[in-house]
Amino acid sequence: MQTAVFFALLSMILVGVGDFVYKRAAFAGALPSSFLVVQSWFFGPTALIFGLASGSLQFHPALLLGPVAAAVIFAGARMFLISLGRGEATVNTPIFRLNFVVTVALAILFLGEFLTFRRLAGFVLAATSILLLTGFSVSQFVKEGFDHGKRKSTALALAAMGCMGLVNFIYAIAARLGATGPSFIFSQFCGFTLIAHLHALCLERRLRIDRSVWVNAPLSGISGSAGLICLIMALHRGEASVAVPISQMSFVVSTVLAVIVYGERFTVRKSAGLIAALLTILAFK
């Protein structure tokens, strides 16, 4: 179990770096679809190189789930971006980040994992950390919940949360069936890059690859791919109800980097959120 926690922590750090770079690209004006396309060019090769170097690149029937995961991820990411355009990030981001609850519920229902008191405390702490770090306001959520436009935005965020929770569950199934991390992530890449290219060229009818994309997309693709490989390696060694919540605390890394790089204020609320995140990790160890 300790090895699983180690790889889950690595996943948390790497995915957090990728998320931060994505935010940096957005601030620089990168077109999301173009960014995802270039990101995929580095996402897949990272998994391929890692698999070849470690000798873990091998065919397994579970790899057929890779394109399924790719389609679900793309749908979830797109719905989340649309929800941010129609609503407030302080409302939709916490909803989206709670996707690990969906994964754990599916793992308990279908994979026979147990919900212990310690894990339950970990879920509560994780949710608390997310709400604190993202500045979620209950009064704002209640107020916007009665607005028709905001209801649509919230519904999209909930759907995106469900998609990402389902993706993590697919990772758990693939790991249990015996698919290696690099192999599965490369399989997912094959589906994702095709979807990203078709969406950018056919639906948005443009592909703008400028400095904001080239400077940020490679690092985001490499760190994101490595982070998901580490998550699957954690799932090989432990339960989804432990590995996934720890990995999903990646926003903690993004928050710390934002404070260091952009000089964002380190408020009492953010401090409390980071403490809750640390307690979450300890609860799942």
Image: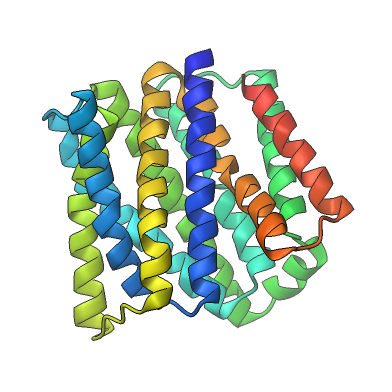
**Which residue shows up at 24% across the image and 25% down it?**
54
Going by the picture, which residue comes out furthest to the right?
268
Of residue 209 and residue 107, the one placed in the foreground of this image is 209
- Left/right of residue 79 with respect to residue 52 in the rendered view: right
| Left or right, 149 with reference to 126 | left
- Above or below, 160 against 154 in this view is above
Residue most extreme to the bottom: 205
**At which x and y percent is residue 210?**
35, 79
Residue 167 visible in rendering: yes
Counting from the top left corner in percent of width and height, residue 238 is at: 45, 18
Tally of marks: 0
The picture places residue 106, in percent across and down from the top left corner, at 44, 34
Image quadrant holding the C terminus, namely top right
Q: Of 80 and 251, which appears nearest the observer?
A: 251
- Residue 57's image quarter? top left
- Residue shown at 75% from the left, 42% from the top: 274
29 with respect to 130 (left or right): left
Colouring scheme, one of rainbow, by chain, secondary structure, one colour: rainbow
Q: Is residue 102 above or below residue 93?
A: above
The answer to whether residue 179 of the structure is visible from this angle is no
Residue located 81% across and 61% down the image = 265
Quadrant in which residue 166 is drawn: top left
Which residue is rendered at x = 63% and y = 18% of the image? 116
Expressed as whole percent of the image width and height from the top left, the position of residue 225 reads 35, 45
Quarter of the image holding residue 237?
top left
